[in-house]
Amino acid sequence: MSLPEPRDALKALEGYHSPQFDVDVRLNTNESPYPPPSAFVEAWLAALAEAPLHRYPDRSARELREALSDHIGQPFDRIFCANGSNEVLQTILLTYGGPDRLALVFQPTYALHEHIARITGTPVVLGERGDDFEIDRYDALARIEADQPDLVFLCSPNNPTGTVDDRELLEAVLDVAPGLVVVDEAYGEFAYRSALELVADDVPLVVVRTYSKVWSLAGLRLGLCAAPPQVVAELEKVVLPYHLDFATQIAGTVALRFSAEMQARVALLIEAREQLFTELDERAGVTVFPSGANFLLFRVAGEGREGDGHAVWEAMVRHGVLVRDFSAWPMVEGCLRVTVGTPAENNAFLVALDAALEEVQRA
Ligand SMILES: Cc1ncc(COP(=O)(O)O)c(C=O)c1O
């Protein structure tokens, strides 16, 4: 007996892969290297113990959105929450994408923008970043004018390059885009510029954020976006009822009481990122790119288009350090991406990198 096939649009799709290995130092998925403060965990569990678990959670996540409203300086009705920013992105695409719609993404960028678009049956047009990974404003405007996309995805800081978009770029895109402009700011707290302040009732802008990175809560799955209330109301219609459980809603609310601790961690990670940048910049055969996020992209020179990136990645795994291998990706050929870790992890990374560079160059 043969099993049914998925719909045609899905047959050619590969799943999302980020290889995981059991190594000592994992700097491959841009998580926070620090667990959340233990006082947070205690306060969260105490509040959860009081929750009426036999009831469905608050569908509108009102308490969480009110707390977020104070935190991000946007009114409550401009905030939508979901299980990780990936679910926010999926809900945006389920609502504003579809077979008769078009999404524009600028590569290289976060693979899930294109991936979720295709899963929702949304055709995708691909723009390209320049050699410095900036989006050229005039190219972008020409693309938008030619293709008239219903959704434009920007990512600032961009994963995997770390590039922070110009304010002029965003304003120009907002001026000409015929549909929604989505700015993925999963790493927004690590950057010196955010699009959050441009969100307004009459601007077709959605800014996406997450608790996974800065808030050390990747394991809980909580993301949000700020958008005009009309957009938030449409997203609420599409997302599954009661999708955000008590544990997540309470965690998101309680975490905001620990803003000062989180700010201190952001400052630490930014400082460590800059130190790591300098270290990488000093190494022969390594080109590191400026980053506004909690990771750095660097290219390893070598013969051929992909340089020694993959060989160095493999050697680093043997030395117990896992980074993300982008060496075969178009436009980031030969590149690896390292998440900023604790001082000990960053040190282990540099030691493994040096050993790997030497082994590969000797081979
Ligand atoms: C740019 C970007 N957006 C969204 C996400 C998804 O994050 P979340 O854990 O909130 O689903 C990631 C995760 O790495 C990311 O890099």
Image (spheres, rainbow, N blue to C red):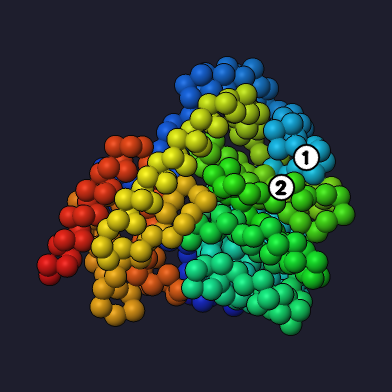
Is 52 positioned to the left or the right of 295 in the image?
right
What is the count of numbered marks? 2
Provide residue 341's location: percent of width, then percent of height. Answer: 38, 41
Q: Which residue is mark 1?
A: 74
> For this rendering, which residue is in front, 176 or 29?
176
Provide residue 59's location: percent of width, then percent of height. Answer: 75, 37
**Which residue is at a point 83% across and 56% down the rendered structure image?**
203
Is 216 positioned to the left or the right of 322 in the image?
right
Q: Is residue 122 visible?
A: no
Q: Is residue 329 visible?
A: yes
Give the amino acid at mark 1. Gln
Query: Is 329 drawn above or below residue 249 in the view shown?
Result: below
Q: Which residue is mark 2?
A: 196
Would you call the spot at circle 2 few (<14 residues within 10 Å), some (14-19), or many (20 or more)?
A: many
Provide residue 213's location: percent of width, then percent of height. Answer: 51, 42
**Which residue is at a point 67% across and 26% down the rendered structure image?**
54
* Mark-to-mark CA distance, 2 and 1: 8 Å
**Which residue is at a point 53% across and 23% down the rendered structure image?**
40
> For this rendering, which residue is in front, 337 or 292?
292
Would you call the spot at circle 1 few (<14 residues within 10 Å), some (14-19), or many (20 or more)?
A: some
Query: Is 222 drawn above or below residue 202 in the view shown?
Result: above
Query: Is 116 drawn above or below residue 73 in the view shown?
Result: below
Give the amino acid at mark 2. Leu
Q: Are marks 2 and 1 in contact (CB under 8 Å)?
A: yes
Is 348 positioned to the left or the right of 10 in the image?
left
Provide residue 113's location: percent of width, then percent of height. Answer: 59, 63
- Sequence order check, earlier mark of 2 and 1: 1
Query: Is 117 drawn above or below residue 159 in the view shown?
Result: below
Indicate if the residue with disc 1 has its beta carbon within 8 Å of ligand 1. no
> Secondary structure under badge 1?
loop
